[in-house]
Amino acid sequence: MKKSTISLAVAATVATSAAVHAGQYVNPSNTGQVLLFPFYNADNGNQTGIHLTNTTDSVKAVKVRFLEYKNSDAVLDFNLYMSPKDIFAFAVIPDANGDGAAIITGDGSCTIPTLGTAGGDFPGTATENADGSTTRVQPFSNYQYIGDADSSIERSLTGHVEVIEMGVVSDETYAAAATHDATGVPANCAALDTAWASGPWSEDPSAGMSSPTGGLSGMAYHINIESAASFGFEPTAIDGFSPSVQHTVPNSPAPAISDGTSVATVQVAGGTWIDSTLGSGAEATSALLQTNSLSNDVLVLPIIGGMTDWVVTFPTKRAHVDVATAADVVPPFTDNWDGSSEESSACEPVSIGRWDRETSAAAVVETSICNGTSVISMGAAGAGSALSASAGRTLLGYPYVEGWAKISFDSQSMTLGSGATRQGLPAIGFAAYKVVNGAMSYGQATEHKTSITSSGI
C-alpha cells in the first residue's frame, strides 16, 4: 500500500496542470464557476459584507444561496445576472424587524426575484434614496427547515454562502438587458423578469444560454461595529464545475453544490493531478475539498486581550447526510441529520491536538463537530469570541497563551473511482484573531492549513 501526505499549498505551483483535466477542481488562482464562502454572521450585531465579481467580458447568470449553520438548509436564494466586469456588493445583517438575518444592498444588478419584495412571512423593503438609488433589504426565511424541532429563524443568523454560475447569457437581447450603462444601471431588469414569467425561459430555461466559463471571484469581511474589529477572508473557488448550462427558475433548489460533474480532478503525491469519476457531483466536490486535518495558530495572550476563533465549514455535508438513516449516509461522512431534536445531529468524531510555541503538547481532545458551519473558540473557561459569535459556537479548552492546534479527521474516508482511498472530510474555513489595545481592536483572519492523506494511488 502506498500512503502519501502532502500540503495543498503546493497546488499553487501546479495550477496550470489542473486546467487540462476533465473534472472540477479547486482553482488556486481564486476564480471559478463556484465560490464557497465559509462564513457569514449576523449574530450579536455582527455584519458580513460580500463582493461578487464577474472578471469576464460575458453576462453571467449566477445562483446565490445562503445556508444556515446547522444542516446547511437554504434560507435565501436568488438568480443574479451580472454585467461584464460587474461587482455585486451586499451585506448580511441582523433583520431589524425580526430575529433572523437579512441581506441589504444598494447594488443595481438584476436579481430575480427582485430583492426587497414585500409579502410573505418575512417581507422585504425597498427604500428610494435621494440620489436615485434603492436600498433593498430581504430577510432570510426558515422555509427549508420549517418541519424541524428547531425551526427558529435564529438558525439563519450564521452559516455559509454558495455562489454557482449557471451559464453565460448569450442571447443578445437579454445580455443587453443585464448590461450596465455608464451610470452603473442595468438597461432593463424587467425584461429578464418577463423572460421567466411569459418569455422563452418559462418554457426552456436554457434558451439563449451557453455553458459556464468561470471567472467569478469574491471577497468578504466580517465586522462588529461595537467591538470595532473586522476580519477579511476569501472564498474557495472551484472551476470546471459543470460543462453544461444549469440555468434554473428563481428559488429552485438547483443548481446546488451537489449538481456539478461527477468527475473530480484531485491532487495526489508529488503534486500531480488525476481525474476520478465518483458516484455523484456531491462526492466529486467533496473529493476536491477533502482534507485529513485543519491546522492553524492560536493567540489568546491576556496582556493584549487575545482571542481566537476557528471557523470550520463542511460545504457539501448536507448532500451526504440529509438522509433517513445512518446507513444511507454517503462517505466520507458517517452520521445522518435528524431534525427531530433541538440539538444538531450528524456529528463527526475528530481529534484535536494542541501545542504551545515551544512544541509542548497538551492531551489530545477527542470530540465531535456536529454543525455544517461551526465557530470554535480557543482558550480557558469563559474565553471570549473573536468574532463575537454565539450561534454555532463551542469553546475548546486551550491551556497555553500562544501556539497552534490541529483538528484531525482520522475516522472518515472515501473511495475514488480508481479504487484509491482518501482520508478526511471536505472542510474549509479560517482562524480569526482579535487583539485589544485600549479602545482599539484589531482583527486578522488566516485560512486553515490542510493536508492530503491517501492510499492505493
Image: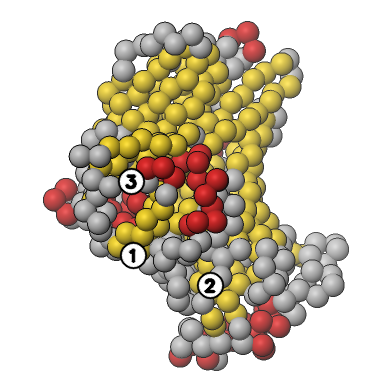
Q: Give the spatial CA distance, label 1 vs label 3.
A: 33 Å
> Which label belongs to residue 212?
2
Please say whether residue 112 is visible from this viewpoint.
Answer: no
**Residue in view at x 57 percent, y 33 percent:** 446
> Which label belongs to residue 277?
none
Local packing at callout 2 (Cα closer than 10 Å; few below 14, some 14-19, many 20+) is many
Q: Give the spatial CA distance, label 3 vs label 2.
A: 37 Å
> Which label belongs to residue 262?
1
> Of residues 64 and 167, which is closer to you in this image?
167
**Residue in view at x 40 percent, y 26 percent:** 406
Q: Amino acid at mark 2?
A: Pro
Say which element carries label 1: loop
* Of marks 3 and 2, the one in the foreground: 2
> Left or right: 315 with respect to 334?
right
Q: Where does label 3 land, which residue?
A: 150
Q: Amino acid at mark 3?
A: Asp
**Residue 81 in the image: x percent, y percent?**
62, 72
